[in-house]
Amino acid sequence: MKIAFQMDPIGPININADSTFRLMEEAQTRGHELFYYTPDRLSYQEGRITARGWPVTVQRVAGDHYTLGAETEVDLAEYDVVWLRQDPPFDMFYITTTHLLDRIHPKTLVVNDPFWVRNSPEKLLVLNFPDLTPPTTIARDLATIRAFKDKHGDVILKPLYGNGGAGVFRLTTDDRNLSSLHELFTGFSREPLIVQKYLPAVTKGDKRVILVDGEAVGAINRVPAAGETRSNMHVGGRPEKIGLTDRDLEICARIGPVLREKGQVFVGIDVIGDWLTEINVTSPTGIQELERFDGVNIAARIWERIEAKRA
């Protein structure tokens, strides 16, 4: 198949952790032809959705992990699959790329389905399952956020459309920084904030469960570094081997059919203790860590589903 990857610049990626690299590597092993472009090179031109980028081959050699062919412009309608893999921020630039890719999907299979990526960002899709999530409020109004904090005491405050642990704050019962943080966030962004009851179980780890076409295939645990609230690997969280509990499987059984129906082939959910906190559909991570811990080929599982859909 002809496969295009819409992703952040390939040069700086960590080839031992990046899930997009692993997907490219497995696709290449399976004989597929790869094309790479960054989202700023996606265009609408008189009815055609085009991208300016490069044929690419990859190899697992640090510092020499990719080789580009000649730069060229392609019509993405002529491709079998386009991967939507750039990281947030989930802003209007990101949203516009989903609108453009909508115009070729599903004749060209866009993974994950751009319509539902746009309408189900990670911190909002969980609102469909309030009984599975910790107490949560989404608001821009300080009085509403303050009332939530007064009710629950120890809370986590973060930007609604952030990623990688950026801008995540824990406000304990006696913390007096809420007003200042509210001023800071609203001073540079128009987006709301999300505030959740703090879950003490996070000190034992924030579990990333990987689902392929709605089916749980494994999990890794991400343990916060000493003195940190955040467990994201971007900010020093330590991945460790862990299994799926009955509660994890219960959560996945509830959300899996919804993800499958909405064309979300590769999803990573976050579970702290017994609670679902995020459903990551934009550019989930965790494939390589899970493969190393469990000795399974998750990338192959993903490609098998995609190849079956194309067949």
Image (spheres, rainbow, N blue to C red):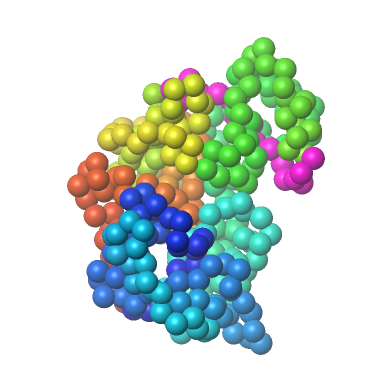
| Front residue of 233 and 109 | 233
| 297 sits to left or right of 186 | left
Name the residue: 49% across, 48% down. 280
Is residue 307 something one can see in this rendering?
no
Residue 44: name its quadrant: bottom right
| Front residue of 224 and 16 | 16
| 228 sits to left or right of 296 | right
Residue 81: name its quadrant: bottom left
From the top left corner, tell me how far across and down residue 67 is, in percent: 37, 72
Q: Decide whether residue 188 is among the magenta residues.
A: yes
Q: Is residue 159 above or below residue 178?
A: below
Q: Decide whether residue 248 is among the magenta residues.
A: no
- The boundaries of the magenta stretch are 187-203
Q: Is residue 74 above or below residue 290?
A: below
From the top left corner, tell me how far across and down residue 139 is, in percent: 72, 37
From the top left corner, tell me how far across and down residue 95 is, in percent: 64, 61
Is residue 242 something one can see in this rendering?
yes
Name the residue: 29% across, 59% down. 61
Name the residue: 45% across, 71% down. 36
From the top left corner, tell me how far across and down residue 51 is, in percent: 54, 77
Query: Looking at the image, which residue sits at the far front?
Result: 63
Q: Quadrant of the N terminus?
A: bottom left
Q: Is residue 307 above or below residue 161?
A: below
